[in-house]
């Protein structure tokens, strides 16, 4: 749902895959929020300009080099003050969405966040990528990776009250179990929960295990595997559209996009070269 006037534009929508998760994109020049609360964890990333936030930690400046985190039921407000613009993206995680994320992290309750303004440039980029991924048409496995991985880093670095997210073990046998699932089911939709279950890990641990063991996330590993399968089919003169579906890509366009990004050429160029 989009709403705009001459000075303030907003777009708000619900994530249909995850009950309790809603998202907002806003570009404000005059709008100010009076003191209020949410029954949700609020995380916001500033893309341009800034605002002054009033919360339990007192008035603080929000800008592009800092992440805004507001605990559920924590009163807060915002006003433009010296800024003439505030363009930001935000996440609202209510009880169902929080429970889903915490399950992926392997923790049973949300930690409190002692700081409302967090200067962490890497995490800011992670949350921007997550917001754009949830807004766009990213692969479901990729969206889940972004969601669990990004909130996992937030909780590990800045959560208090004793909540701990376990780091992944260095275990080739566990990695081999998850890789085995991908190799057997590369042509099917595979969830992060299924892969984590095969390895006996939390979803957050699984992402870390893949990064440490292969240098890739589970989704990136699966995409690479699918490209290898598709290329083998193309080498044997299988039509491009048929090779795409056999390898697990949604359609020929999806294969072409990933193939060119990975190899620098299109599937058609590859088949022509392979045929001599």
Image (cartoon, grey):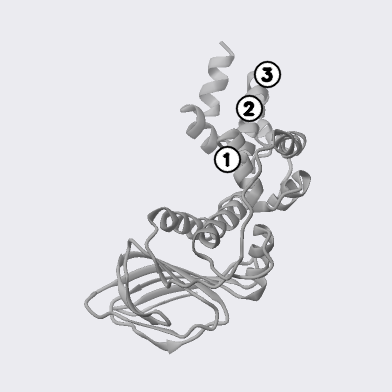
Q: Quadrant of residue 88?
A: bottom left
Q: Position of residue 162 (x, y in %)?
A: 60, 67
Mark 2 to mark 3 CA distance (whole Å): 13 Å
- What SS does tag 1 mark? helix
Camera-near label (2 vs 3) is 2
Residue annotated with mark 1: 211
Q: Position of residue 222 (x, y in %)?
A: 64, 38
Residue found 65% across the figure and 66% down from its top: 18
Mark 2 to mark 1 CA distance (whole Å): 20 Å
The reply to whether residue 24 is in sight is yes
Other-residue count near label 2 (Cα within 10 Å), few / some / many at <14 / 14–19 / ≥20: some
Camera-near label (2 vs 1) is 1
Q: Position of residue 151 (x, y in %)?
A: 55, 60
**Please, which residue is most extreme toward the front here?**
162
Quadrant of the frame with the C terminus: top right
Residue annotated with mark 2: 228
Residue found 33% across the figure and 76% down from its top: 60
Q: Quadrant of residue 67?
A: bottom left
The reply to whether residue 17 is in sight is no
| Residue 10 drawn above or below residue 244 | below
Mark 1 to mark 3 CA distance (whole Å): 32 Å
- What SS does tag 3 mark? loop
Other-residue count near label 3 (Cα within 10 Å), few / some / many at <14 / 14–19 / ≥20: few
Residue annotated with mark 3: 236
């Amino acid at each position: 749902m989009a709403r705009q006037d001459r000075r303030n534009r907003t777009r708000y929508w619900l994530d249909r895959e995850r009950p309790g998760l809603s998202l907002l994109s806003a570009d404000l020049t005059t709008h100010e929020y009076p003191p209020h609360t949410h029954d949700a964890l609020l995380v916001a990333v500033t893309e341009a300009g800034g605002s002054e936030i009033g919360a339990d930690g007192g008035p603080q400046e929000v800008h592009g080099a800092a992440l805004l985190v507001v605990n559920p039921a924590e009163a807060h407000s915002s006003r433009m003050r010296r800024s003439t613009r505030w363009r930001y993206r935000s996440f609202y995680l209510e009880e169902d969405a929080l429970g889903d994320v915490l399950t992926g992290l392997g923790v049973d309750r949300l930690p409190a966040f002692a700081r409302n303004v967090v200067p962490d440039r890497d995490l800011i980029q992670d949350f921007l990528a997550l917001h754009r991924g949830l807004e766009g048409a990213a692969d479901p496995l990729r969206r889940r990776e972004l969601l669990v991985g990004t909130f996992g880093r937030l909780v590990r670095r800045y959560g208090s009250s004793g909540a701990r997210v376990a780091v992944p073990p260095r275990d080739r046998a566990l990695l081999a179990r998850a890789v085995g699932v991908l190799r057997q089911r590369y042509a099917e939709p595979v969830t992060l929960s299924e892969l984590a279950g095969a390895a006996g890990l939390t979803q957050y641990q699984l992402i870390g295990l893949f990064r440490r063991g292969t240098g890739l996330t589970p989704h990136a590993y699966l995409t690479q595997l699918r490209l290898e399968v598709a290329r083998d089919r193309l080498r044997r003169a299988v039509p491009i559209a048929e090779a795409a579906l056999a390898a697990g890509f949604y359609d020929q366009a999806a294969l072409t996009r990933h193939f060119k990004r990975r190899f620098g050429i299109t599937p058609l160029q590859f088949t022509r070269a392979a045929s001599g």
